[in-house]
Image: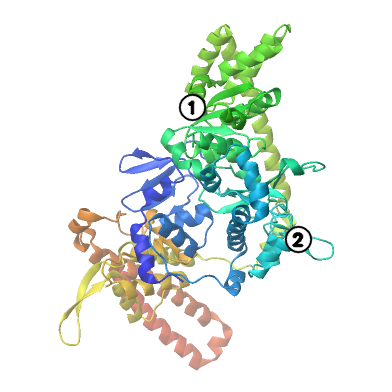
Amino acid sequence: MIDRITVDKILDAANIVDVVSDFVTLKRAGANLKGLCPFHDDHTPSFVVSPARNTCKCFSCGEGGSPVGFIMKHEQLSYPDALRYLAKKYGIKIEEKELSPEEIQSQGDRESMFILNEWARDWFKNQLWETPDGKAIGLAYFRNRGFRDDILEKFQIGFCPNNKEQSLSAEALKNGYKERYLVNNQNEMEPRLSIGTGLSLKRDNGSLRDRFYGRVIWPIYTFGGRVAGFGGRVLDAATKGVAVKYLNSPESIIYSKRKELFGLFQARQAIRKADLCYLVEGYTDVMAMHQQGIENVVASSGTALTTDQIRLIHRITNNITVIFDGDDAGIHASERGIDMLLAEGMNVKLLLLPDGEDPDSFAQKHSATEYQQYLQDNQVDFITYKATHAIGAKRGEPDAEERLIHNVTESIAAIPDEIKRTVYIQHASQQLKMPERLIERAVNAQRNKLNAEKQKELEREQRQTQNSTYSAEEEKTIISPSSPTISQDNIEKAGLEMSVAQMIIRYGERIMCTIEDEDGQDVPLSVAEYISLSLKDDAIQLQTPVCKTILEETIENAHTPNFRAEQYFNNHPNEQIRELAFKLGTDAVELSKLYDIPTFSTPTGKEAEKSNETDLHLDEIVPSLIASYKLSIIQQELQTIIEQMKRTEAKEDKDKYRQLLLEFTQKKKLCTELAKQCGDRVVLK
């Protein structure tokens, strides 16, 4: 549990620009900043960060929020863990007791798996540095390959012994971690993504066996620095008879190999600073380049490059240089990823190492200065790369040049930006010594082909959607005459209640007027307090629990120094309240068509000092809004009374009918009074 004072310190320190900049490259756009949205496939910057409001929002998919809300969504953390993340970022100390086994078990599935993985990382690391087997086998392996201890420490390298008496599985159970999270369990919601880390395998007799036994271990981090999974390698002396040299954690609700890049967490600041990312194949390639002073490098972990991985890089930089081994397999691997990178709008260069070399082996033979110079001198654009390597590989074949042109134009056609395509068409014309019009014609033909394929895919998806919808007969059953309907009155009332909530969130702490207390002294009354008292006068409450909570908590805190309702609710522990506050705080919500209420941005700093409730006309807006809300409630109650009076049983029971008539008269009178406050409104007769 984090105490309120510490929470306030964290929220006060958290700057939305600082927080978002760790994950998204932002560029100034007037008073705000913009970047590619990290929550959806964004090709044109639609993610806006507002320093003044200390919030962010994507105007395409709608995601966003305060610093804590952003971290919760991006890193998929709970509210307390998002606060811990921000506390660590800003150096704010949190005093917390260590989690007990009972508390560990009470964590959600995702959080429990992350906690277990972090414990496992430390256990693997301890085995490498502190045990005889770890030192003699694991540590010796890396030192023989020339890796320094500081590099091993930087990547938190570990070791899993092949020792039944010293197993991770047994140690984890002893420390209170549940078997449910050690092994893999079927996930009914998403069968492909299991629940459980897969650190252990369950034998037929029910005992557990370490998945990574006898391997050196690399932790694989999320973008934000949590351990999502592990990669393990059988050591050279033990590879005989082993079918799989490298082994990864299984797909789960926190780890997907196709969505992670090894080294991205360690590289993200260097990538942003250099505005360039180097892409290599394996774990040791990344480590070797770090050892040579090149930190802006990530690895696809031996898998074919995926769109998800490209988008992770694209959040930070538009520029990527692909480095692959100098053999035929390396050449083919690099070519497979070129079009995918171009299609995502990346600026792509390629670098092929000398034959037989990979980034790790090449690093062992050259100094840091020589290595860095080689990278600078030998990276080329994809057209030069293809012209050099493809022609050389196919020289002597009659159709070599034709195939090369098709290869190049297919890559150019993948580029989404028209200006960039035009530049590359001109460049290809010069490189391939072909008329520009022929290159352009081939590119356009390829784009038409791609568009036709996309259209077919779209039509397939539409057919699948249609097949999965209800039949006409099923719809009749679902939408029957007896199904409940939402009346226009209910719709209006709900809209007005949201407008009341919006007023509380934006201006709830503002002093609106004063009232006299029992001693005749003027007492300041906030917007929230006025709303509460006004509703109580007519025995009316807000209908929605979340709106009730917002009103109650604003009243509790309204006179607390430096309290701002919008900031408070944007960082609220309750997700429903937090999301509603963000929506109502940033979106223009129409309060009423009967009067013009401007949408204000919340002023800050000197701007806030100049602003007051008179400028905002809160003393006019709030009473009118509350009167409209109360009127909608009373009108609905009047309608209910009329319906009751029409029933036969009410007409036959004179006392009941008389009571309903009295209630109708009283409410009609109140309705008329409220209508006068609102202006010309329809009153039931």
| Image quarter of residue 383 | top right
Which residue: 64% across, 16% down?
A: 389
Query: Helix or strand or loop: what does disc 1 sit on?
Result: helix
**Which is more N-terminal, label 2 or label 1?**
2
Look at the numbered disc 2 and give the secondary structure of its residue.
Answer: helix
Counting labels gives 2
Residue with the mark numbered 2: 164
Query: Foreground: 191 or 492?
Result: 191
Q: Is residue 652 visible?
A: yes
Q: Amino acid at mark 1?
A: Gln
Residue 578's label in the rendered image is: none
Q: Residue at x 21, y 71 (%)?
A: 513
Q: Is residue 232 above or below residue 346?
A: below
Residue annotated with mark 1: 372
Q: Is residue 310 visible?
A: no
What amino acid is found at the position of numbered circle 2 in the picture?
Lys
Q: What colouring does the structure picture have? A: rainbow
Residue 499: horizontal and vertical position, in percent?
38, 63
Picture coordinates of residue 620, whole percent (x, y): 24, 65
The percent position of residue 157, horizontal first and vertical second, equals 59, 48
- Residue situated furthest bottom in the rendering: 655
Residue toward you, 659 or 93: 93
Q: Nearer the viewer, residue 478 or 274?
A: 274
* Camera-nearest label, 1 or 2: 2
- Judge from the rendering whether residue 263 lies leftward or rightward of residue 236; answer left or right: left
